[in-house]
Image (cartoon, rainbow, N blue to C red):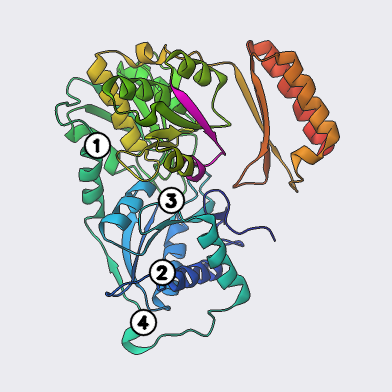
Amino acid sequence: MGRMFGTDGVRGVANMAPMTAEMVLEIGRATAYVCKQHENTQRHKIVIGKDTRVSGYMLENALTAGICSMGVDVYLLGPIPTPGIAFITRSMRADAGLVISASHNPYQDNGIKIFSRSGNKLPDAEEDQIEALITTGQIRDIRPTADEVGKATRIDDAIGRYIVFCKNTFPDEMTLEGLKIVLDCANGATYKVAPIIFAELGAEVIAIHHEPNGTNINDQCGSQHTEDLRRKVLEEGADIGLAFDGDGDRLIAVDENGDAITGDHIIAICAKWYKERGWLKNNRVIATVMSNFGFHEAMKQQRIDVGIAAVGDRYVLEMMRQDDAVIGGEASGHLIFANHHTTGDGIVAALQLLAVMRSKKKSLSELASMMRLFPQKLVNLNVQEKPPIEDIPELQTAIQAAEATLAGAGRVLIRYSGTQSMCRVMVEGPSVELTEKLTDDLVEAVKKCIG
């Protein structure tokens, strides 16, 4: 068995290893044990939130039981976006915040993400410590009794607290009055909070995919499936469409013409505005190896430096802290504004983008024109194993041939998913035809070499 924690916590099909009630109980126990090592004069406490998956009920109860069995109190937030849990963890001075969600994955999957008391994702070392406690059985016989057992309490106003937090990230001197906004809530964790936030700031809000039933989360909607949002923006004559993923930490926008605006576009637009206002610390933004070639060209034109992190918002944030950068993110829509939050937040990112539109008095399509998106093709291949790509000579030869053909006017990226049994093959190039041909060639090479 490989490492339990991937790039974004533990994830898998709910009710199958590692996402069984039994394993989640053990994750709760191990996390609580680690938290009890923190210096604390009060009782230790952990907050738990979740998205709208039907399996969330089962896993929430198992996680609660595990934590309470180690003598740590639990505060239950209910359905709330992942970044809301990070915020509540910090504001309540809790020892940790646990998120029950599989983010953008289909409803049958679920997962556990862990935030530290500072509102940041747990570092690899602490995740490894939790995993070791589970696999070695080191804590199996630690059983508090009587009044040392933990208690569980439901926090009824968690959503209200998060709504106030998000609204405070939007400039005081601005409102959204006169803007028509379509929100795609992915039938996920933003279904209740997002419409309230944008409406209270003055926008006319039309919400779609905001009626979760436990099984429709991310189902042909949200940040990975913007077709319905694009149609609705055109139908309503809206100024902008905003699509979140199932747990609310991603944002993809749609302009008034119905065209999708990626995370790369949003970073570029906001970085330029931050630089103009003197807010772009060290004149630097952090992106990942998945960022579009056109993003790097746009940043060169703006004379803004770009740091390149590994895929995963935790690695983006790590580099942001190292470089003291205030903006970072991924093309997929994980966007971090460190002057406002400790983690990626789709709603906060949307409010920053809207602030630029209001400040500049420009449409989203006008703002996005600063960046030309290079044609890109991404193919996800299911794989049984993940041998190191650099150790496969035949595949390396195919990659080098594709790069030689592009001659610096594009790029090739082949990598494994950190959360799924997939190999991702991506090519960006100067034309659709060349990009598709090179991608097809590399897909065949991966199938031949990896299977």
Look at label 2 and name its amino acid: Cys
Query: Looking at the picture, does residue 421 appear above or below residue 231?
Result: below
- Tell me the number on the disc at residue 149: 4
Mark closest to the chain's N terminus, 4 or 3? 4
Q: Please tell me which residue lies in front, 352 or 178.
A: 352
- Tell me the number on the disc at residue 214: 3
Q: Are marks 3 and 2 in contact (CB under 8 Å)?
A: no
Q: Which residues are magenta?
A: 304-316
Give the Cα distance between marks 4 and 3: 31 Å
Mark closest to the chain's N terminus, 4 or 1? 4
The residue under the point 34% across, 33% down is: 349
Mark closest to the chain's N terminus, 3 or 2? 2
Q: Residue furthest bottom?
A: 146
Q: Is residue 21 visible?
A: yes
Q: Residues within 10 Å of mark 4 (few under 14, many from 20)?
A: some
- Name the residue carrying label 2: 35
Give the Cα distance between marks 3 and 2: 31 Å
Q: Is residue 81 visible?
A: no
Q: Say whether residue 152 is left or right of residue 231.
A: left
Of helix, strand and loop, which one carries label 3?
Answer: loop
